Amino acid sequence: MRTGRALVGGQWRETAERFAVTDPATGETVAEVAECGADLAVEAVDAASAALPGWRAMPAHERAAIMRQAAALLAARAQEIGAIMTAEQGKPLAEAAGEVVAGADHLLWAAEETRRVYGETIPSTGADTRMWLLPEPVGVVAGITPWNFPVSMITRKLGPALAAGCTVVLKPSELTPMSAIAVAECLTEAGFPPGVFNLVTTTRPEEFAGAVMADSRVRKVSFTGSTAVGRELIRRSADDVKRLSVELGGHAPVLVFPDADVAAAAAGVARSKFMNAGQACTSPNRIYVHESVAAEFVDELVKLAEAVAVGNGAEPGVTMGPLIDDRAVAKVGRHVEDALARGARLATTRREGPGRFVPPMVLTGVTDDMLVCREETFGPVAPVLTFGADPGDEAGGEGVRDADVAGALARANATPYGLAAYVWTRDLARTMRVCEELQFGIVSVNGAPLAPPQGPFGGIKGSGYGREGGHHGVEDFVEYKYVSVGLG
Ligand code: NAD
């Protein structure tokens, strides 16, 4: 049993009350963590405000050096922090350790970017005037992160915020605070000045949100989580006209064209669908396969789904862990039952539980009106839909009519969400046209990765706004002050 503390102004803080953290695989309590009230959130904002002038004034090379050190410490502890993550989140050890390494890479990339937060000189209209843009940090930032990627969701916010010269108060998910505490330990050991990074653990997120939204010293809130909570934060940000980044839910379509490498497409879909037991905002939710290759695709996907070893992520050989809690299991059950009741077919062997262990499932005969196609399932269910007709002579070319492509695109775009989409084709012209038409913030073609640190990750429409990663991610934490100087 571990104990976890908050980090405020460089001090590890105990609280009178603690909350329990549960292993989703066993139901056992694995940690007890400080239950911080609004008072500690305000203290953390005090500390972040006090640390801001020093941090923003520190030469970028020095800030970069501390961040590089933090990234190195995090990467060096990948196995150990991975085990902590598995115990509170459930994903298999290899996946968890991989996430820690990826999380460290986000910090490292941002550390390098620290030295490239450039201003601009603008040609002025008069001979005796000069115009400059000075990049300045937004100020104190509050971050709120979910449980599904307990380390990388943090470093993706933290890296760019710190690179821009901001100080941060972070509230991790109450389900995965120990991973966040491990990140905080690495930052502390790396030598961040006290107050630059503060961690507030609590099971009362509304209290934390109330404190930071009401505090005019907090100039930006960066949130990743559900669309419902994101909407509420957007409303509340109006009172104080705070800047916001909101990375919200998703409902990713996949388009598989007949010219694709169908086996590779099935393998790619299996990878992104069953990773983290389907609990990812970028998880494929509607898999549109051209009728002419649908049977081959389903055969491959079913084989891969049945080969997944479901179990306690801490055990060797397990490739998929449990769902996070009973509510998640119930939601997956509801979605599958709805699909079956409306005529879908379970193409994988029916396997039950136990408990939170939900086997990967492939559904065929799915239609766009089913719950799986309208709400985020957040579980290992792969719904396969088809588009186009079997190619006859009239189809010509590779058997895909323009109208079929247009129809598939319209269905893919028919969602309030707009985070990630996937395309499988080897036709360059089709790739370009389809990428241009898809209304999503990110498109992965032929299985290329979605979230490397240099890529500006983020959504449109109901999936939110703001970008994490790339120089765009850092700019989300920068104000550009326009200075116009008369030389007199
Ligand atoms: P959630 O919205 O319940 O919780 C996310 C965070 O918000 C947690 O830290 C939680 O404590 C906090 N929170 C909850 N209620 C709050 C309130 N009233 N005010 C302020 N904070 C509050 O979401 P979740 O279940 O933890 O995460 C899953 C969701 O996150 C899914 O919808 C998923 O798609 C989304 N997500 C999006 C991205 C992305 O980059 N777009 C990445 C990962 C997850």
Image (cartoon, helix red, strand yellow):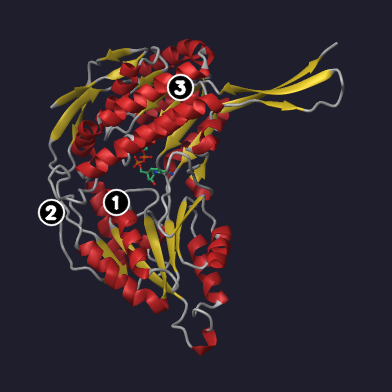
Depth check, front residue: 240 or 426: 426
Measured in 3D between alpha carbons, the distance from the residue under mark 3 to the one under mark 1, in whole angstroms, is: 32 Å
Disc 1 and disc 2 in contact, CB within 8 angstroms: no
For mark 1, what is the residue? 275
At label 2, counting other C-alpha atoms closer than 10 Å, the crowd grade (few under 14, some 14-19, many 20 or more) is few
Q: Residue at x 20, y 31 (%)?
A: 80
Badge 1 amino acid: Met
At label 1, counting other C-alpha atoms closer than 10 Å, the crowd grade (few under 14, some 14-19, many 20 or more) is many
Circle 1 SS class: helix
Q: Is mark 2 within 8 Å of ligand 1?
A: no
- Tell me which image quadrant ligand 1 sits in: top left
Rendered location of residue 249, percent (x, y): 42, 47
Q: Earlier in the sequence, mark 3 or mark 2?
A: 3
Q: Give the mark count.
A: 3
Measured in 3D between alpha carbons, the distance from the residue under mark 1 to the one under mark 2, in whole angstroms, is: 19 Å
For mark 3, what is the residue? 64
Residue 116 horizontal side relative to residue 232, left or right: right
The C terminus appears in which quarter of the rendering?
top right
